[in-house]
Image (spheres, rainbow, N blue to C red):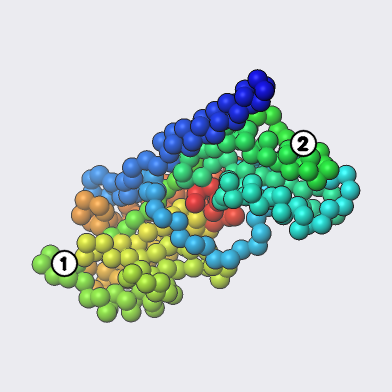
Amino acid sequence: MGLLAIGVVVVAGVFAYNRIQEKRAQRSFALGHEDILLGGSGGTGLGRAPMVPHRPQPQRERLQPDERIDYVIELALKAPVAPAAVEEHWQPIHRRHSPRAVLTADPSTPVWKAGLQLVARAGAVGEAELIEFRAAVETMAAALGGIVAAPEMKAAMEQARELDQLCGETDIQVVLHVVAPQGGALDGTAVAEAVQSGGLAAVGDGRFVLRTPEGRELYEVSWRDGALSLTLDLPQAPDTVRSFESMARLAHQVAAVCGGSLVDDNGNALSAQAVAAIASQLDQVRGVLEARGIAPGSSAAARLFS
């Protein structure tokens, strides 16, 4: 009875600690945001993307655990088990850790892989949650007659911290503004025609989005306080520089059609040199991500920066 009481206390403690860690994790990605165009005329400062409600992504193939961004546990079954039986044991784990938890199987082997995403925009995974996930997968393996192989917990936490830092440094959102001449207003009809002629599709709430043929979002156009804002989320946009240059061209075209001008957040006009400098900075950030195997617009980037 004494051991049972101790066990109850320990389990309660793990869950309580987990809740605390989840709240602390908000400090990492949930930082205040400033747009990329900061400061004086032609400024080129980069700003971190804000926390915004996650918009549903186009339907994709089932996600695979990825050792670059997940804590991956291999579950080897000693005898064949129906996939439905594995899924039945997995569902409580998935519900508890959704949307970070991922499970898949290699059809050529009796090995399943369970992954827990280490970092998202909400922050890095807590040690308590990682321990809980590993224990749940080990219990699942025992119930299915299998064994697990899992990375060291200390190494996984260090990987999470490094990845969180990387994401904090590269979570960039670029915003360009088209404003009307002083005392005037942008013609909404003319703006809509110019934007749609650029290949963007209306998605409601006055927003237009340009997507790749595969459904990846390149950038969006929306109204903000009477001005037109064009926004590119760097980690989500494949071919970063070309996407930004396309957005800048559209901004200039809309400004020309409506008699407006391209400005930064302080209302300072943006020169061609300033826009080129921004493109150069974005290319440097793209290089940092690609060096870690997380190319902007890739599945890994979409998961990390969601």
Query: Which one is nearer the viewer's eye here, 214 or 1?
Result: 1
Q: Along the horizontal axis of the image, is 45 left or right of 105? A: left
Q: Residue 70 got which mark?
A: none
Give x and y (percent) for residue 242: 48, 60
Q: Along the horizontal axis of the image, is 200 left or right of 252? A: right
Residue at (59, 55) in percent of width and height: 299
Residue under pointer 1: 181
Query: Which one is nearer the viewer's eye here, 230 or 215?
Result: 215
Q: Is residue 290 above or below residue 158?
A: below
Give x and y (percent) for residue 28: 44, 37
Residue at (42, 62) in percent of width and height: 219
Q: Quadrant of residue 275?
A: bottom left
Q: Is residue 242 visible?
A: no
Q: Residues within 10 Å of mark 1 (few under 14, many from 20)?
A: few
Residue at (62, 24) in percent of width and height: 5
Residue under pointer 2: 149
Q: Residues within 10 Å of mark 2 (few under 14, many from 20)?
A: few
Q: Which amino acid, mark 2?
A: Ala
Q: Which amino acid, mark 1?
A: Pro
CB under 8 Å between discs 1 and 2: no
Residue at (21, 65) in percent of width and height: 226
- Per the image, label 1 sits on a secondary structure element best described as loop
Q: Is residue 163 above or below residue 88?
A: above
On-image quarter of the N terminus: top right
